[in-house]
Image (cartoon, rainbow, N blue to C red):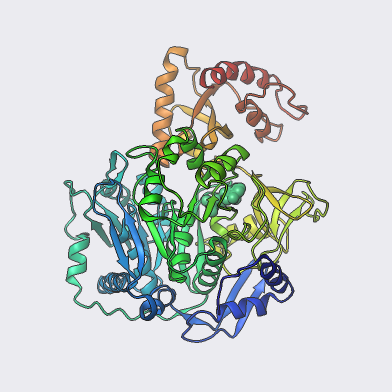
Amino acid sequence: MELRIDTFKSYQTAYLKSIESPQLFWSEIASAFEWFAPHQQTFNGSMEEGNIRWFDGGKLNITINALDRHLESKGNDPAIIWEPNDPDDLNETISYKQLHQRVCAFGSALRSCGIEKGDRVILYMPMTPELAIAVLACARIGAVHSVVFAGFSAQALADRIQDAQAKMVITADESRRGGKTIPLKSVVDAALTSCPSIEKVIVQRVTGSACPMESERDIWMHEFLAASKDSNCPPEIMEAEDPLFILYTSGSTGKPKGVVHTTGGYMVYTAYSFANVFQYEPGDIYWCTADIGWITGHSYIIYGPLLNGATTLMFEGIPTYPDASRFWAVCEKYRVNQFYTAPTAIRSLMASGRKCVEKHDLSALKVLGTVGEPINEEAWHWYNEVVGKSNCPIVDTWWQTETGGIMISGLGNLSPTKPAHAGLPLPGIDPVLLDPEGNEITQPNIEGLLCIRSPWPSMIRTTYGDHERCLSTYFRPFPGYYFTGDGARKDELGMIRVIGRVDDVINVSGHRFGTAEIESAINQSEMAVESAVVGFDHEIKGQGIHAFVITEEPIPLHDQGAARARIIDSVEREIGKIARPDRIQFVAALPKTRSGKIMRRILRKVANGDFDGFGDTSTLLDPSVVESIVNNAKSLWFATN
Ligand code: WTA
């Protein structure tokens, strides 16, 4: 069965069918894959109970579908094209046959190290082909991979390792990011002082810098691979609902949670959505600029493309190295057909001017995609006109770590597009807007809470080790619906515009952080007694982080710089550089209600430079707090804008 729909009419037909007979719809799509045993039941469980099972009885291995299945027809076609950080370094093209061999060799080496089905393996790696290979090798042997973005700190890495109770870490000596190198192995060493579950560390040699190895625990990747003589790696037979991976993401409360995706449903949905959103045709070169440390990299650098036998380009570097035309140089070099990036990258490249784009031949581009945060109209138009020459549809893909795959988006050039609108749902996806009481909003152009009414194959199954948290975050707020945490509007034609988070999650450059997580990191610095963090509109990053901090003693003006540096250090230590606050404002008190709750809407207004009209503040314990925060914010705000 062909996964790709190729007209808008057939999209409409597929959509209707998927809503009227979802089980039949997904069962047919599932039959396009290779299973050791077919499923007995398409869907099992209930949204009310947050108990979701797809393709029960089905047995499979996702790598058979991503690799083995293509060997006969396209074994010599490129599976991965790897573009290194430095344009003068050697690039790499890995055919399906070679990728299969390397995954099998890696999988069998993992097995000889004692890694078994169900064991958790942490990948803390640069964007090298070995990262993709390690992911697939875990899937081959049924180990549960958990990739941790290589910009997280030792503490954040340790938190994830402990939560997952992982047995192994795969890392590298260093990672190259533009002109910088990041010492990954020493971060791992620091993390492992508090992670007794880890038995082995596999280290890829990337830069060749000196790197202390602990003889019992650490093995160089090349030695690990050479030691395993057996390159034959029979696939582990997985149940459809066996976990495939855990990916940690931030929520509005507490520590990041491990979103669990399972094998069968995730495979079916990522493959289906990739084929349709990007309208990939055989021979195309597809490039997603995300990092594999995030869900976008999982679903649309590795699994979605490879399940479709596509050629996926993987880029080690950053958009501004050696200069701001790198993305476009790479598009020209490989004649990229589908290009998928984030609004924050578009906005920052926009700032470097159109010349950077215009000096490159982008005539191969067919589809442009964006993901991770709302795209503002200005960036949308620039992307459309300067990059796409008004000739490429933009697919504004809305989805989440928890949804596994793209939920709302145009399908290549089939669908109507509208600036800053994700558009229509994919077949099988039933989004609705609810008011705060949980009633469905049926009139157009009214903002509501974005929820999904029926289950889809790649939805979150649980949060690792804490199912209660999964239920209370996603399934209990509105019984019978999956709650996304986003606010959205629908126009008369049903085109959806996602406005942003309605919970305490801040989206900085497309990266999610919980305010509670950053506050707890700030409070770890000895000087902070209490803090409150909110997002503010940021021209490039989408949102910036504004922290209001109460210290034990008032800090004199001339010491504030040093005090801020200490707070930033603490955030970098607890989470990583990516979570650094843009602004730190020292305050004497926070606006709290009598029940002790911080009135964040006031802080949000202040952080956005909106200093009057705070609405009803009568529930505040001490309304005068607002005035003092505003006075002190004004100087800070004007200094940084
Ligand atoms: C936001 C990334 C508007 C949204 C795949 C969501 C978007 C969060 C879009 C998930 C979009 C993602 N338009 N907002 N096209 N795509 N978002 O888990 O707030 O890193 O809830 O997954 O990003 O972020 P996550």
How many marks the image carries: the answer is 0
Q: Is residue 17 above or below residue 178?
A: below
Q: Percent from the top left, x then y, of residue 275? A: 53, 67
Question: In terms of depth relative to the viewer, which is nearer, 632 or 391?
Answer: 391
Residue at image position (54%, 43%) is 383
Would residue 87 appear left or right of 424 to someone viewing this image? Answer: left
Give the quarter of the figure containing the N terminus: bottom right
Classify residue 602 by image quadrant: top right
Compared across the picture, whether 145 is left or right of 441 comes to left
Frontmost residue, 569 versus 3: 3
Q: Is residue 620 visible?
A: yes
x, y (%) of residue 478? 73, 57
Quadrant including the C terminus: top right
Q: Nearer the viewer, residue 200 or 606?
A: 606
Q: Position of residue 10 (x, y in %)?
A: 67, 70
Where's residue 377, x and y in %? 62, 40
Residue drawn at x 61%, y 42% is 504
Could one spot residue 514 in this view of the protein?
no
Left/right placement of residue 65 relative to residue 187 reads right
Where 467 falls versus 193 (above or below)?
Answer: below
